[in-house]
Image (tube, grey):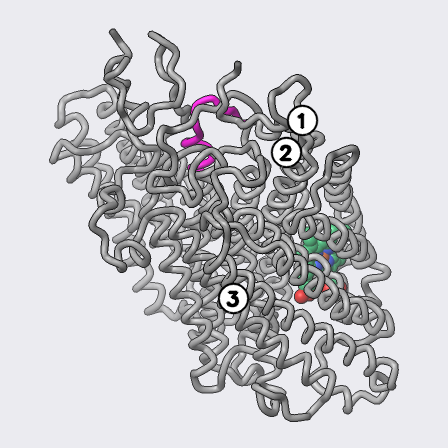
Amino acid sequence: MTAISAPMMPLEVKGGAEPPARRQLVSSATLGMLIFIAVELMFFAGLISAFTIVKSTAPPGAWPPPGQPRLPLELTGITTLVLLCSGALAWLSWRAFSRRAATARVTRPLVAALVLGASFVVVQGVEWLRLVGEGLTMRASTYGSFFYMIVGAHALHALAGLAALAWCWRRHAAGRLAPSSFAAVLALWTFVVALWPALYAVVYL
Amino acid sequence: MTTTTAPHHADAPTAEHVHDAHDAHEQSFFTKYLWSTDHKVIGFQYMITGLLMAIIGGYMAYGFRMQLAWPGEWIPGVGFLSSGRYNAFITTHGTVMIFWFAMPVLIAAFGNWLIPLMTGCDDMAFPRINRLSYQVFLISAVVLIGSFFVDGGAFGGAWTAYPPLSSKATMNLTPLGSTLWVVAVALEFVAFLLGGINFITTAMNARAPGMSMMNIPIVVWMIVVASILFMVSVGPLVAGAAMLVFDQQLGTHFFDPGQGGDPILWQHLFWFFGHPEVYVVLLPAMGICAEIITCNARKKFFGYKTLIYTVFATGIISFFVWAHHQFVAGIDPRMANVFTITTLIISIPIAEMLFLFIATLAGGQIRLNVPMLWALSFVAEFLLGGVTGIFLGASGSDIYFHDTYFVIAHFHYTFVPIAVIACFAGFTHWIPKMTGRMMNETIGKLHFWFTIIGFNLVFLPLFITGAWGDHRRIYNYDHFPDLTNAAMQDLRIASTVGLLIMIAAQGFFVWNLLWTWLKGPPAGDNPWQATTLEWATTSPPGHGNFHPMPTVYRGPYEYSVPGAAADFTPQHLPPA
Ligand code: HEM
Ligand SMILES: [Cu+2]
């Protein structure tokens, strides 16, 4: 008993019993990330409802505005699938990680998730350049403003998520990736991936 | 033997490891006071910054109230107040008092101080995020103040920033100031997001062993729920703020009806945040008063669980009342009916909370010390604010009252109890813990009475002028013959005199602080004979707060328990 000198030891430790522990809901890193994601969810909910209100109050025939380019439905449909695959691969990597599988079984799906996610962002960027070239700019119409606003906000989140995945990859290679950090990053990436089909449905379809 | 080495989770600090702060010996002034991750230092930083900002906000109020009482006259310390500066003063006053005074002091300062101490842990869950939160907050304050010095001056389109006034430089004449205003508010939100994540995570994950959810002190619950409300409501406003900045600087037309946009959209995004925001500041204030009232009534809080569940319910309902601010904005009358009903519904849980306070007082051994005076006056004054809200919540009467001084009086009878009265209640109650010294009761009482008298003299007359139809957005009544009769002007002057009294009364507080600093008697660990964990450690608490860390054995308000040795049984005291 006398050896207990840790600073967080409770005042009263009954002889022989386990010292009472501080109970955690989930790890602090994950809880913090989940709260952050809730905020982001409301942020996008705000954007989508603003978009829906403006769209539904536009005079007949004015939405999308005549003379403005149409959004690339099919190509974006494909990149949506690519992004979903990226999300699934990230989960595979997490599964291998939490089962303490060999490094390669964690790294391979993780890198694949990174590559697929990055290609999603790149294709989006190329499409943006084309649309801007064809006259769909932020200023041209509220249609354009909302498009760049919503899709751009998602793209920023995707970039942040990719950076976080890359960080996990590096930490794991160094053998220093804490499960709680990986779980938090996975939550972020899952949010980015799962949000996109909803945005696609609202903005493109 | 299994217990000789403690299991890993028990000896790890509750906070993520922060090495720079945990070797407390050789610290320079900079690392100790400006770059610290200690929640107590950050709490002080927020408190001091918040109080300095309150002085700025108060100075603005002084400026425009003088103008309203004696239009066009030279104002000592301000000069002649032009209409543009008047608008900037009003706008900055509202913005500062809510975002840079009420929130930082009530949530960030008290949250930082009380959450780790009352839940029995050594620091916040994420100390470095906590430090970052204050730094971002400081930058936001600098940006806001800086906006006074740019071309065109500070934004003057009211704290609600309705477009098109806020979105078009041709209308607001503050091409840079209006954008800086949005940027400052957005930065402040970032600071509170970082802070809020910390508060919630700490209260959920780092509590002392034995402290179940239903053993958490009320004020901690209140700050947690307030943080959740803030987090959930702020997203849409951030979206709106981004759209507003794009309208201002990039030439988009989100809020421009002529170009396919919708100005009412902003009002929805703003008030979807704005109404929950009033509960964001109300709940911590109520929590502070709940602690003080139970402690000084020497009675268990009446209906602890009822209160907690009521708070959850209030939080949820507060997301469904926002359009009561828009009854005259041209919304559909059927929608107005819905929001009238939800607004009347939300006054029920608010009233219920006040009844719980009163029931706690009933039959108690009441000690009328300074914190208790503040806490009791909170209940009394807030009641007036809450009741007048019902007049405004009924769309029929609001069409008349909207944008009159009645609205101003209503929300100051809520905000002043929240941000001024409850803050002083909290200061006078916890400053002995924060500094280790007692404050002076006599100076404290003088401060209390002069502030309360001044406050009521400011806003009671405004209920009357408002009911007479006095419009709230007029710079100089000389141009409005209907509103310049002598009776109205007398009431305006009375209100300004009240403000001068209220400002002067704060001299007592400064005096009391100085007295405490120079001559305050030592407070001891537990000067109020209170039960919660913050009183289990030294005053002020040292680095790491508790040595050894406490274990909790009971609920937070075991006062006057029959058969107990003293009339209070602290949470950490092992059962006999
Ligand atoms: C929690 C305490 C409260 C606070 C801090 C508060 C704050 C405010 C503020 C700041 C405004 C004016 C906003 C502006 O136009 O600048 C306001 C207006 C209003 N409040 Fe409250 N309020 C509180 C409680 C209530 C309650 C309990 C009710 C109803 C039961 C209520 C109903 C209203 C209504 C309907 C308006 C709109 C009046 C108008 O602009 O025509 N408030 N309140
Ligand atoms: Cu409201």
Residue B226's x, y, as percent?
Answer: 56, 45
Q: Chain of mark 3?
A: A
Residue A65: image tag: 3
Q: Is-magenta flag for residue B208?
A: yes
Q: Which of the two residues, B192 or B430, is positioned nearer the viewer here?
A: B430
Given this view, does label 3 or label 2 mark the residue nearer the observer? 2
Say whether marks 1 and 2 touch (CB < 8 Å): no
Ligand 1 has an atom within 8 Å of the beta carbon of the residue at disc 3: no
* Residues drawn in magenta: B200-214
- Horizontal side of A153 relative to B509 (left or right) equals left
Are dots 1 and 2 on a single chain?
A: yes
Residue B308: image tag: 2
Question: At 13% across and 27% down in the image, what residue appears?
Answer: A104
Question: At 61% across and 51% down in the image, what residue appears?
Answer: B425
Residue B512's x, y, as percent?
Answer: 55, 61
Residue placed under numbered mark 1 in the picture: B560
